Amino acid sequence: MPSGFNFSASPFDCLTPDEQRLVQDNVDIAYFPQGDTVLAPGAQPTHLFVIIKGFVQQFDGNEVVTTYGPEDCFDGRGLMAGKSSSRFVAAEEVVAYQLAKQAVSELIADNVTFGALLFSDLSNKLSALSARQSRHELQSLTMARVDEAFVRTPHFVDADTSILDVVKEFHALRTATVLVRDRQLSPPALGIFTLTGLQRAILDGTPLDQLKVRELANFSLIKVRPKDQLGDALALMIRHKVHRVVVADGDNITGVLEALDLFSFLSNHSYLINIQIQDAQDVPSLKLAAGQITRLIALLYRSGTHINMIARLVQELNAKLFERAWQVVAPAELVANSCLFVMGSEGRGEQLLKTDQDNGLVLRDGYVPTVDVAQVCQQFSAALADFGYPPCPGNIMVSNPAWCQSADDFSQAVRFWLMAASQDGLMSLAIFLDARAVCGDRALLEQVRTAVYDMTTDNDAMLARFAAAINAFGSSSAWWAHLPFLGDPGKDALDIKKNGTFPLVHGVRSLALAHRIRATSTVERVNALVEAGRLPQKLAHDLIDSLHFFMGLKLKTGLQRLETGQAASDEIHLDKLSSLDRDLLKDTLGVVKQFKALLNQRFHLEAV
């Protein structure tokens, strides 16, 4: 009876002490020489294997579909089905634990998480992983519901109430916020009046007992639901530059969530970073705020915050940082007559740690600047570099005249990218499709984006050339199936962007372009494609799960590199992954392979 079984490896790390004893009482050690068939197709497995030493390859026909290494287990699905559907061969000398089928059945019956992590599909594995970590994730307060924070009781006044009487309400109710009902409007409207409005009322000069609150109330309410996450409420406050949101369950107003109350609950400094950005008057002040963003990301990740929530907060904070930086370096007339936009992972809302600059500027047609726009753009690019965002190797920045043009000239450039369909042009198009406005007149960017969708209808040849980039990296022979790369020290790192993120993101981008979907984030594009009946629901879920896994794995390894003074990169060192991460990596890369097959068929890429 072996005593060295590793209960820290997935899926055994979720077992209780009694379940661990069950394993110890029912496990033995097996040995297989190199080349031996451990399980043949159609065989009836009697044990679950957990590798101690060596590697086992799984074959479907003559194709290697995956490789199992130390601490990996197989063939859970065959064990439960009563028949193995694949051939498992010792790629080198193998020593493995073998756990009796009856014990495995008892563990699955008693521990749902164990069963899901053992042989479920990607979505169920990630759901089980989330459940297993739920206690840890509860510490991530951005995941808490709005109604779990301190929501202030709503106080209502009629729109005809004078400002003086409202101030009396402030004093009597010990509040600084009232909701204003205006029944004279059709339909009746609800607004909000705060101390900020009182300051404007005093400056107005009208006697406060003669000035009605409807004159200074804000009727464009920002609302959240009680069940929404606090992280979403925080993102809304940052985006709309407000200090409070109204909490509403349908038409029922349940309260007001104040920024200070939210911040006290979250205590993760994200709102303070936003305030620091908004108050900055020069580039050095903004640099301090930019440095805080990376520290916030590390804090949120280590407290268990979901990757999509971190990405959303980072997108909003970066957008405010870039907006304020542009306002600091560019004169007001240039800001008013242009639209600054970001692209790439920043535009899609999928950037976490700082990456290369990808941005551009659209100028209003007919605008004659009184400043040297090129010099201002150089200052902006230099400022971002000082903040830690390196210059783009492809020079896709506002400091490049090709990415700083009038709306008409930009539209002409986009049309040329589409018509010529050259490699460089399609690359530029792909980058531009992710554009998201961060400052200035957003209509200018939309004017250029319209030029794209006006020319994509029935342009199958261009769409095929555009989508073909998904096959630029990797190969169709399931290279990822050989993880870890047996005995080849030169292949112990995986470029997760080239082999995972890029084909997924660009494939979704290609389908969105083909169906004229204007969403910029990958998740929004996937959901729109499902709604349009262009993507199977199950595959869509797996694509989103895979994207978030890739983002999380890259963030995890990136933070580790930053802690040791190294720059973050797209390389994932496979020998440093946990058995669970290796298992999920195989599943997610399998999803990418399945998606690429769909895209190759949809766009007829074999002819490109």
Image (cartoon, helix red, strand yellow):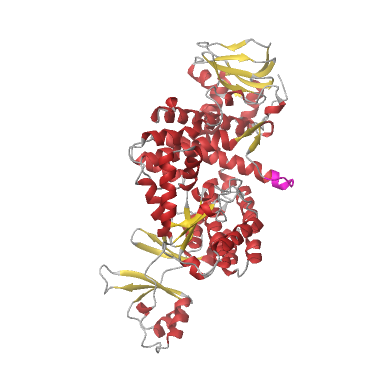
Q: Check if residue 297 falls in the magenta segment.
A: no
Q: Is residue 472 visible?
A: yes
At which x and y percent is residue 107?
56, 27
Residue 514 as seen in the image, left or right of residue 440 = left
Q: Check if residue 565 falls in the magenta segment.
A: yes
At which x and y percent is residue 97?
66, 19
- Furthest toward the right, the residue is 564
Residue 549 as seen in the image, left or right of residue 603 = right
Residue stretch in magenta: 561-567
Relative to 211, say whether 40 is above or below.
Answer: above
Relative to 419, say whether 178 is above or below.
Answer: below
At which x and y percent is residue 257?
47, 64
Q: Is residue 264 visible?
A: no
Q: Quadrant of the N terminus?
A: top right
The foreground one among 568 and 155 is 568
Q: Quadrant of the C terminus?
A: top left
Give the quadrant of residue 247: bottom left
At which x and y percent is residue 206?
39, 88
The foreground one among 122 and 598 is 598
Q: Residue at x 72, y 45 (%)?
A: 566
The mark total stands at 0
Residue 68 as seen in the image, left or right of residue 171 = right
